[in-house]
Image: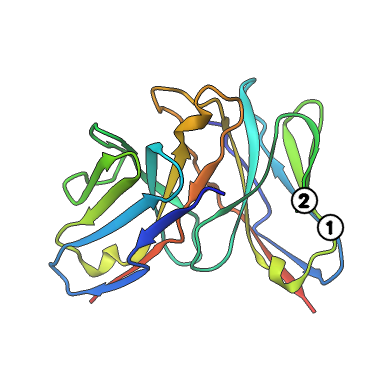
């Protein structure tokens, strides 16, 4: 089945540093990937939509200069949290849509296992 | 995107059937109803999807009345491992080549299965 991986699974960094999180579709090509953030006991909040070969589309209230998204290939999207601060500590989840289902009425979005970011 | 309303939490016991109802009064004609399951510190996992009437797979059943303003996820004979948060999402599932489609998660239902 379709598998999405994330790396790293957890990361601890110092305040002011940048952290890169990778999202890979392992056995399918994903034209579109999505990045979510989830705080404890809360729901997933969509941050941005990442399209291969073009600029990401950010949701309202999400700082594009702070959360840099690059979707350089059909199997890889990266999220870089720049100048991280303790309030950026959260669970970051990516998801990907299989391009082979384009035009199909059925669409399933595949989620990665998440990355736990802790900023000290 | 249609807004969804679910109970915040539910309790059940092992072996019981659990029904989680989701309200989506503003569902549009092209919208499908999808349910995801999420365990702590994991990404959501697709459970089931439907448009109308009843859909059943090896994991759950999804009941959708004719007016489609609500849906019910039915989990038969739950076990402790079914303790998780369940999300109901409604959206136009047609894969648009302009990639305008996106999933918006509501608050979800926290299901606790007791021994």
Q: Quadrant of residue B78?
A: bottom right
Residue shown at 42% from the left, 61% from the top = A114
The answer to whether tags 1 and 2 share a subunit is yes
Residue B26: x %, y % from top left? 63, 28
In the rendered view, how is the structure colored?
rainbow
Q: CA distance from mark 1 to mark 2?
A: 7 Å
How many numbered marks, from 0 up?
2
Mark 1, Cα crowd under 10 Å, few <14 / some 14-19 / many 20+, is some
Disc 1: which residue: B76
Q: Are marks 1 and 2 in contact (CB under 8 Å)?
A: yes
Residue A46: x %, y % from top left? 40, 46
* On screen, residue B101 above or below A5: above
Indicate the secondary structure of the residue bearing disc 1.
Answer: loop
Protein chain holding label 2: B
Q: Quadrant of residue A83?
A: bottom left
Residue A82: x %, y % from top left? 16, 57
Mark 2, Cα crowd under 10 Å, few <14 / some 14-19 / many 20+, is some
Residue shown at 50% from the left, 64% from the top = B42
Q: Nearer the viewer, residue B4 or B41?
A: B41
Disc 2: which residue: B60
Position of A86 with respect to B84 (left or right) is: left
Q: Is residue B27 visible?
A: no
Indicate the secondary structure of the residue bearing disc 2.
Answer: loop
Residue placed furthest toward the front? A27
Protein chain holding label 1: B
Q: Is residue B103 visible?
A: yes
């Amino acid at each position: 089945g379709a598998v999405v991986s994330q790396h790293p699974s957890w990361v601890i960094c110092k305040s002011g540093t940048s952290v890169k999180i990778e999202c890979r579709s392992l056995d399918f090509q994903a034209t579109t990937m999505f990045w979510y953030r989830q705080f404890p006991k809360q729901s997933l909040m969509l941050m941005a939509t990442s399209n291969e070969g073009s600029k990401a589309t950010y949701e309202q209230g999400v700082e594009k200069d702070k959360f840099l998204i690059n979707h350089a290939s059909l199997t890889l999207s990266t999220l870089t949290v720049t100048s991280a601060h303790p309030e950026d500590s959260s669970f970051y989840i990516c998801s990907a849509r299989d391009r082979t289902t384009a035009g199909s009425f059925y669409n399933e979005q595949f989620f990665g296992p998440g990355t736990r970011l802790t900023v000290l | 995107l249609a807004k969804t309303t679910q109970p915040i939490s539910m309790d059940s016991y092992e072996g019981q059937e659990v029904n989680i109802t989701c309200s989506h009064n503003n569902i549009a004609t092209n919208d499908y109803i999808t349910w995801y399951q999420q365990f702590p510190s994991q990404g959501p996992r697709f459970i089931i999807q439907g448009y109308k009437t009843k859909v059943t797979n090896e994991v759950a059943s999804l009941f959708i009345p004719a007016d489609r303003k609500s849906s019910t996820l039915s989990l038969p004979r739950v076990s402790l491992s079914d303790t998780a948060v369940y999300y109901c999402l409604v959206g136009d599932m047609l894969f648009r080549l302009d990639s305008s489609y996106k999933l918006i998660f509501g608050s979800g239902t926290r299901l606790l299965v007791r021994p």
